Amino acid sequence: MKHFVAVFGMLLLTMGAEGAQPAKKAAKNPPPPRPVAPAPAAGAARLGNPANPVERLMAMSPEMRERVLEKLPAQQQANLRQRLERFDKLPAAERERLNRLWETFNALPPEKQASVTRQMQAFNALPEDRRKELRPVLQRLRNMPEARRDAMLNSEAFRNRFSPAELEMLTEISQNYPLPKPQP
């Protein structure tokens, strides 16, 4: 229920901001839908942003999703429904993994959520070749126990391998958003 209230509140704020626009803007034609980009190569995949409304909807039951979607403009509904359909077609284990990631993110304090979100956006804005190099490093760091991760992040060899901005990304994401342990 807490998830629903948070998403519903966010959507109301979004819809309220759209409704507050002058009438002459409402008469404009809506922008064409953005094309769906093809999935990047596995090594260069982007990080899913748990603060994204789609990620939040994925964690909801289908009934809750439908209630939230009904309140959105038609084009936004169509885009979200398409993305949710892709999510629903994933194997159950992958859907569960994504939901555990969402729960891990949701358990963070708001300032940590904001920090992780900014760093994930920065990661996704990197050129593909840098994402391809950083992604496996980030995944390893996120799976490590805290003491081992901290030792690696502070090692001279590691610090010399990445730019200051990349080090900040790797540190913030891995320390504040570790991968949840697999459930038995």
Image: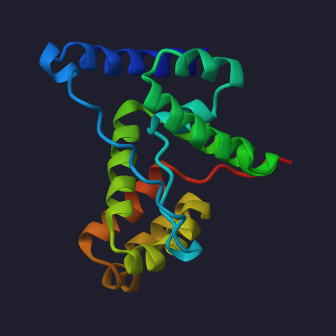
Q: Which residue is drawn at 54% across and 32% down?
A: 56
- Is 24 left, or right, of 53 in this rendering? left
Find residue 73 and report its horizontal and vertical position in percent.
42, 22
Residue, x 42% and y 70% (percent of image)?
Answer: 153
Is residue 12 in view? yes
The image shows residue 176, relative to residue 111, as above or below, that is: below
Q: Quadrant of residue 3?
A: top right
The image shows residue 117, relative to residue 131, as above or below, that is above
Instruction: Residue 160: give x, y in percent of width and height.
Output: 31, 84
Q: Nearest the camera: 48 or 151?
A: 48
Examine the rendered structure and indicate whether residue 73 appears above or below residue 136.
above
Colour approach in the figure: rainbow
Residue under the point 47% across and 60% down: 37
Q: Nearer the viewer, residue 4 or 75?
A: 75
One can see residue 107 in this view:
no
Quarter-of-image position of residue 18: top left
Q: How many labels does the image show?
A: 0
Q: Is residue 23 left or right of residue 107?
A: left
Q: Quadrant of the N terminus?
A: top right
Q: Which residue is more in the foreground, 29 or 106? A: 29
- Residue 105 position, x and y percent, is 52, 40
- The residue depicted at 45 percent of the width and 39 percent of the height is 52
Q: Where is residue 96 in the image (x, y as percent from the top left)?
A: 74, 43
